[in-house]
Amino acid sequence: MMRVLRLSAVLLPEREIRFPPNPVNTLRGALGFQLKRLACFQKVHERTTCHGCPAEAACVYAACFETGGQDAARPAAFGGNLDLPHLLVLEARFSAAAAIPAGQAVTFGLALFGRAVEAVPWMVQALRETARVGLTTERVPCRLAAVTADSGVPLYDPETERLQPWVPERLVLPVPDPADRAADRVTVRFLTPTSFKDKATGRVRPEVEFHRLVMSLCRRLTAFVTLDGGSPPPWDFAALARLAREVRVVASDLEFAPWERFSTKQAARIRFGGVLGRVTYAGPLRPFRPLLEAGQWLRVGRGTSFGQGRYVLEAAETAGGKNDFEPVAEGHLSADNRPAVIAGQEGR
């Protein structure tokens, strides 16, 4: 269906470092700056967007940070929207709640989708430069200690400065059957703020209804697949939407969590956020199981490129209690949470 490559980048700070509540935005800003510096041949011009650049279709920076206008034929699933999902998703695999001492590993996860899997050499070099220049407003210098695939295969050795061949996997999902009405339960734990805006009111929804969750995943999956040169999934989206509306929330401890980020382009702090916590759904949701598993990688909702919309699936009986609620940065999608729908590897 589409190519995907998940990486872990380990940085070692040279002195104590303290990240803001959303470490992903810190890395994203620094990494994007370095990748654009390396890849963009028009940076001497006052161009604020990649859209319309003659090199956009082949540019690794555009693929990872400004996916957009190179695809003239837009499937209906895009709704004609130019703001297609970026092909790079970042996550922090550490807690930002306390200062991190010098020499302690700081690990970020990177997921590359579609043509972005070809950007690995550029991404590694951008990570090296990001570490050298330093992170956070204090510009704490770091050393890039390792870049590995989530399968455990090392891709970059900082001692030899050699890059090993990388092997993307393929995300393959079965066609969901809307006629399958078997009752099921699932608990979704949102690790970073997740939000959906009501089209009628323009306001962020205080709850995450099941149909909003899965149809957002359907649109995001369709966009990723199409951007990788594939055809939209041959699914009966209308029937699936009707089925999804029959699934109900039976337990929830969701709470709104505000986030903010500094926008270099707008030269201002942008406030945003979403809900954190657990929600349990019950009803005819079995056809959506593979999609929900894949969503742990894809992310969902608004602001995914800034770290929002990250979740994991849990056993349904864990929902409803707040005693074991952890801060946003503490969640970690381990190898045990790899979606079962990842099938096979692609040779290069």
Image: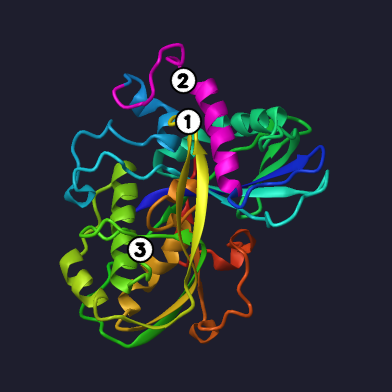
**Front position among marks 1 and 2:** 1
* Mark pair 1, 3: CA separation: 41 Å
Label 2, on which residue? Answer: 40
Check disc 3 and report its element: helix, strand or loop: loop
Foreground: 267 or 30?
Answer: 267
User: In the rendered structure, which disc, 1 or 3, sits on the residue that comes first in sequence?
Assistant: 3
Foreground: 143 or 46?
Answer: 46
Check disc 2 and report its element: helix, strand or loop: loop
Magenta stretch in the rendered image: 23-52
Label 3, on which residue? Answer: 173
User: In the rendered structure, which disc, 2 or 3, sits on the residue that comes first in sequence?
Assistant: 2
Task: Give the answer, above or below, for where 68 lies relative to 109.
Answer: above
Q: Amino acid at mark 2?
A: Cys
Label 1, on which residue? Answer: 267
In the image, 220: left or right of 163? left
* Image quarter of residue 11: top right
Residue 124 seen in render:
yes
Foreground: 10 or 311?
Answer: 311
* Mark pair 2, 3: CA separation: 35 Å
Query: Magenta span has 48?
Result: yes
Q: Amino acid at mark 3?
A: Leu
**Relative image position of residue 247 (x, y in whole percent):** 30, 80
